[in-house]
Amino acid sequence: MLLLIAAVHACIELRRNFPRGSDIREGLKTWHFMLGLSVLVLVFARVALRFGSAVPQIEPDPPKWQSSFARRDAPGLVCVDDWHVAFGVADAWG
C-alpha cells in the first residue's frame, strides 16, 4: 500500500513537468485518480479486516501506555487515510 500511495503522489507531482493540455499531463492526472481510487478500496478493505478479526495477543504484554496509545490512535490514522482520499475524489468531481 505504501508503494501505491507513493505512486499516487508521484503521478501528481510529475505532471508539473509537462505543459498544460499535453497528453502525458492528462495521462498522469488520470493515473493519479485511478491509483487514488485503488487506495480508497484498499483502505476500506483494511478497515473491514480490522473490525472483522480479533487482535492477536502480544507476548510479553506491552506496557499499558503502548496499548492505550495503539487503541486510541489506530482509528484516527484510518480516518486520516479515508479523508485524504475522500477529499481527493471530491476535488476531482467538484
Image: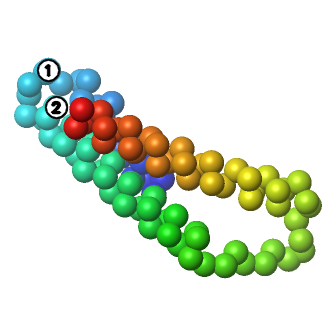
Q: Which residue is mark 1?
A: 19
Name which residue lies at 29% across and 33% down.
Answer: 91
Measured in 3D between alpha carbons, the distance from the residue under mark 2 to the one under mark 1, in whole angstroms, is: 7 Å
Answer above or below: position of 77 versus 23.
Answer: below
Q: Which amino acid is tagged 1?
A: Pro
Read off the residue under disc 2: 25
From the top left corner, tell me how far across and down residue 66 is, in percent. 84, 56
Mark 1 residue crowding within 10 angstroms, few (<14) / some (14–19) / many (20+): few
The residue shown at (44%, 67%) is 45
**Whole-percent x and y of residue 88?**
34, 38
In terms of secondary structure, where does tag 2 sit? helix
Can residue 49 be seen from the camera position used here?
A: yes
The quarter of the picture where residue 41 lies is: bottom left
Quadrant location, the N terminus: bottom left
In contact (CB < 8 Å): disc 2 and disc 1: yes
Where does residue 2 sit, x and y in percent of width and height? Answer: 48, 53
- The label shown at residue 47 is none
Kind of residue at disc 2: Arg
Judged left or right of residue 85, residue 21 is left
